[in-house]
Amino acid sequence: MKSYWLWLFLNIIVWLLAVVYFNEDLDNLTIRLFGVTFYFIQFFIIPITIRKTNLLVIILSINALLASISLLPYDNGGFNPFLILIISLLIAEGFYRLSIGRSMIVGVIGTFGLIANVLYSNLDPFVQLFIGIYIILLIIAMIFYKKTKNRSDDLEARYQALLSEYRDLKRRVISEEDLARQEERVLIAHEIHDSVGHTLTALLMQLEMFRLNISGEYKEQVQTLKELANSSLEKTRNAVKSLKARESGGLPGILRLVRKLEMESFIRIHFSVKHGAFTAPLTGEQSFVIYRSVQEALTNIMKHSQAREAEITFEAPGGSIFRFEISNPVIDNHRYQEGFGLTSMRERLVKFGGNLEVFKTEEQFVVTGFIRIGYEGLE
């Protein structure tokens, strides 16, 4: 919009000088004023035609003709030098706002109008030649400017695209690093809980059985060992809880993992995210369990279905549960029997207050499950 006001200011100044330059009778001055009026009426329409290039070409061309007719020498053959500036402004505006091809239309019409004024005037041939050379050089300069501007705009667009891609890649790297740390903490917590925790629990049971079967002089020592093992088990549980407390997860991490699985398994996946699923405060372990459930459902598709596409829906209705559903079209009517993988996933979801349901219709095979948001999970 600032450029429009600049063009308007320059046109007003040049036209004022052009009108003042003539000192003629009232009739000719009236004709010129009518031309100026229509010129600026056309000029005020330009802002609403910026995106309509063909209409803009017509307006600028008509203005070039109006300027040439309005300042045409009549009886005395006096040439108005400010017509050169007016035509130059129109040609420059054409090259500024339009492509080279459309700008040339405005340039040619403006040049013919200026040549008609020059030939109809009483200017010396040398001055006429000078004006012709000037207008040719102006158009050449405008073509060079337009090409340079196009290259500059193209470089700017590429720079912005690269900058946007760099920022997106940087965010992705940070997100992937954070997710990798989350997954590593989850795996370590599971490993500690499943191996060290179970081993210490077994050790406590063995010590208790040993204490019950020995004489009194060794019972105090065994009790000390039992308390030490119990203390170790409690510290192990605290370490697992500490790892879980620092976990952070969410739907973006799940989507990234599923997208990676999509590329690896060549399955076309259609996502649908509803009802606050993106902002659901899932922990890293909850995110991991949901991803494994989705992965198991997709694995079943690859094993038991000829369809290579699936629809996945995530939602968090009411903010109390996080629900997911995986469905794929059924091609055959073979009987379905739930395997170990889905049963195991159901058990893991139940630990977070959720459940898993699997059913088959004549058209679709559907796996749906949920967990409770904020549920700490069972040991």
Image (cartoon, rainbow, N blue to C red):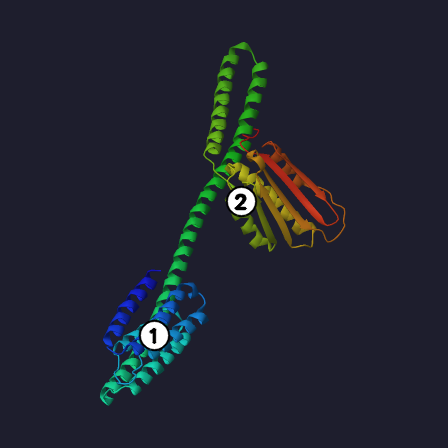
Using the image, determine if residue 219 lies above or below residue 260: above
Identify the residue shown where x is 43% and y is 52%: 168
Q: Secondary structure at mark 1?
A: helix
Q: Where residue 30 sits: x, y (%)?
A: 32, 75
User: Viewer-proximal residue, 18 or 281?
Assistant: 18
For residue 157, side relative to residue 204 (left or right)? left
Residue at the spot of label 1: 91
Using the image, determine if residue 121 lies above or below residue 260: below
Give the spatial CA distance, label 1 vs label 2. Answer: 57 Å
N-terminal label among 1 and 2:
1
Number of numbered labels in the structure image: 2
Q: Amino acid at mark 2?
A: Ile
Q: Where residue 70 sits: x, y (%)?
A: 33, 77
For residue 15, side relative to residue 371 (left or right)? left
Residue at the spot of label 2: 254
Identify the residue shown where x is 50% and y is 13%: 220
Q: Secondary structure at mark 2?
A: helix
Q: Residues within 10 Å of mark 1 (few under 14, many from 20)?
A: many
Of tags 1 and 2, which is closer to the observer? 1
Question: Which residue sits furthest front?
Answer: 26
Using the image, determine if residue 9 lies above or below residue 35: above
- Residue 322 lies in quadrant: top right
Q: Amino acid at mark 1?
A: Ile
Identify the residue shown where x is 41% and y is 76%: 101
Q: Residues within 10 Å of mark 2 (few under 14, many from 20)?
A: many
User: Viewer-proximal residue, 203 or 335?
Assistant: 335
For residue 290, side relative to residue 112 (left or right)? right
Q: Where residue 93 sits: x, y (%)?
A: 34, 70
- Residue 355 lies in quadrant: top right
Asked whether the beta carbons under mark 1 and mark 2 sit within 8 Å of each other, the answer is no
